[in-house]
Image: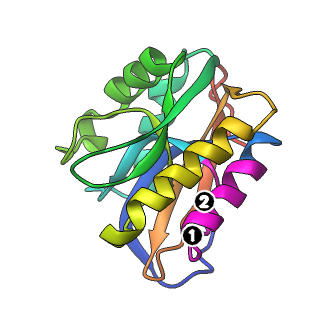
Amino acid sequence: MGSCNGGGQVNSFALVSYIPQPLAGFLDRLRAELVQECHARAHVTVLPPRPLPCNTEEAWRALQAGVQDFQPFLVDLGPVEIFPVTQVIYISVLSGHAELKRLHAMLNTGQLAVEEPFVYHPHVTLAQDLEPSQVTTALETAATRWKEYGESHSFVVDRLTFVQNTSGNHWTDLCGCALSSGVTI
């Protein structure tokens, strides 16, 4: 497992699929434009942040077992939207939505299960924790930039990364695996 460079490790873990380049670079720049202090890499979350009742090695083995037969799949991103309750601005997931929900349901069990505050909704977060006065402008900026982006809005989910948060709110990669192979990378 990896070490932590952004502060002390906390009991908050997630499972993500990082978005590949060049789409990731665009999304990272857009996120930084909308929220200056945002340093998270562009990703789709499969298991939202959660504490673990077991050690990380046990959790990782459970995750690997859960995805060993899951095949890579295509994700096509849709329009920019907003969650009305939290005011989180995000890009919706069109194709790949059902596969992400199935993957989440398969893995949110046993030692990895938590009762999440919201129903799992696959998306790519662009901005959160904004001041109420910033939301409308940020939403308009995000929608405009996304419409102007001329490259592909699609990518393949073929790798998952197990991450841990730190007291400095920086996520550290612990380990990862390729879908359908279960091979640790």
Question: Which label's residue is closer to the chain start, 1 or 2?
Answer: 2
Asked if residue 53 lies left or right of residue 43, the reply is left
Give the spatial CA distance, label 1 vs label 2.
7 Å
Would residue 37 be counted in the magenta stretch? yes
Vertical placement of residue 84 versus 94, above or below? below
Q: Mark 1 points at which residue?
A: 38
Residue 75: image location, x then y, percent: 60, 22
Q: Give the range drawn in magenta.
A: 25-42
User: Foreground: 56 or 128?
Assistant: 128
User: Foreground: 67 or 116?
Assistant: 116
Q: Mark 2 points at which residue?
A: 31
Amino acid type of the residue tagged 2 in the rendering: Arg
Q: In this rendering, does residue 79 appear at all?
A: yes
SS for callout 1: loop
Mark 1 in CB contact with mark 2 (< 8 angstroms) = yes
Q: Which residue is drawn at 59% across and 75% down?
A: 36
Quarter of the picture holding the N terminus: bottom right
Asked if residue 102 lies left or right of residue 150, the reply is left
Mark 2 crowd level (few <14, some 14–19, many ≥20, 10 Å Cα) = many
